[in-house]
Image (cartoon, rainbow, N blue to C red):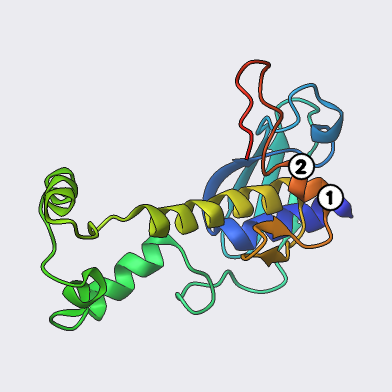
Amino acid sequence: MEVEQKVRGEAYRLGNGQHKITCPSCGPSRKKKTDRTLSLRIDNEKILFNCWHCSMNGIVPLREKMPVNSEQRVSHMSIATHVKDEPLSGGAVEEVYGGPVPENHTLNFIEAINAGQQPISDVWSHNQMLEICHLSNIAMRLGRPLNWDPDKREVIGDKQANSFLSRENRKGYEINM
């Protein structure tokens, strides 16, 4: 039952097609726990799965059809289709960038330094974006949602999740703040 739930949950997250995930049966006992040994083949009606390590396999019927629009499931395909069908209004990108869109980010960075201005790709917005990526990976590894405190920059009430945020530095390379 746990395997069916994991496979079904991954199917709704990943969408139709062929994918590889960590096997919920043998993954926790493996030396490399994150090895993606479970192959999924997902269509609108069922999920076929097979683990190349423990040979667990089967078919999981989908309870409902796979979501296909961007409101139900956001994917790069649904976003690309949405933008193609309903393009952004004129000036929307320039409004987000706060001016004309540079063709060369490196040149924009150098020009911003020389002018004493903020570049288009500033460090703080990239830091926030990468923070979200790291938290998503931690949540996927732990298999549960996280409550993030952006002011303290830590996961609220989750010691295990917080242990993924940093690691002990090698001797001689410590950072003291």
Q: Amino acid at mark 2?
A: Ser
Which residue is rendered at x = 73% and y = 66% of the image? 147
Quarter-of-image position of residue 112 = bottom left
As displayed, is residue 123 above or below residue 27? below
Residue at screen point 14% across, 71% down: 99
- Looking at numbered disc 1 in the image, what kind of residue is underneath it? Lys
Quadrant in which the C terminus appears: top right
Which residue is label 2 attached to? 163
The answer to whether residue 157 is left or right of residue 19 is: right
Describe the element under mark 1 as helix, strand or loop: helix
Q: Residue at x 64, y 25 (%)?
A: 174
Quarter occupied by the N terminus: bottom right
Residue occupying image coordinates x 82% and y 55%: 158
* Mark 1: few/some/many CA within 10 Å (<14, 14-19, 20+): few
- Whether residues under marks 2 and 1 lie with C-beta atoms below 8 angstroms apart, the answer is yes
Q: Give left or right: position of 165 versus 2.
A: left
Residue ID for mark 1: 159
x then y, percent, for residue 4: 81, 54
Find residue 84 and report its image quarter: bottom left
- Quick check: can you spot residue 5? yes
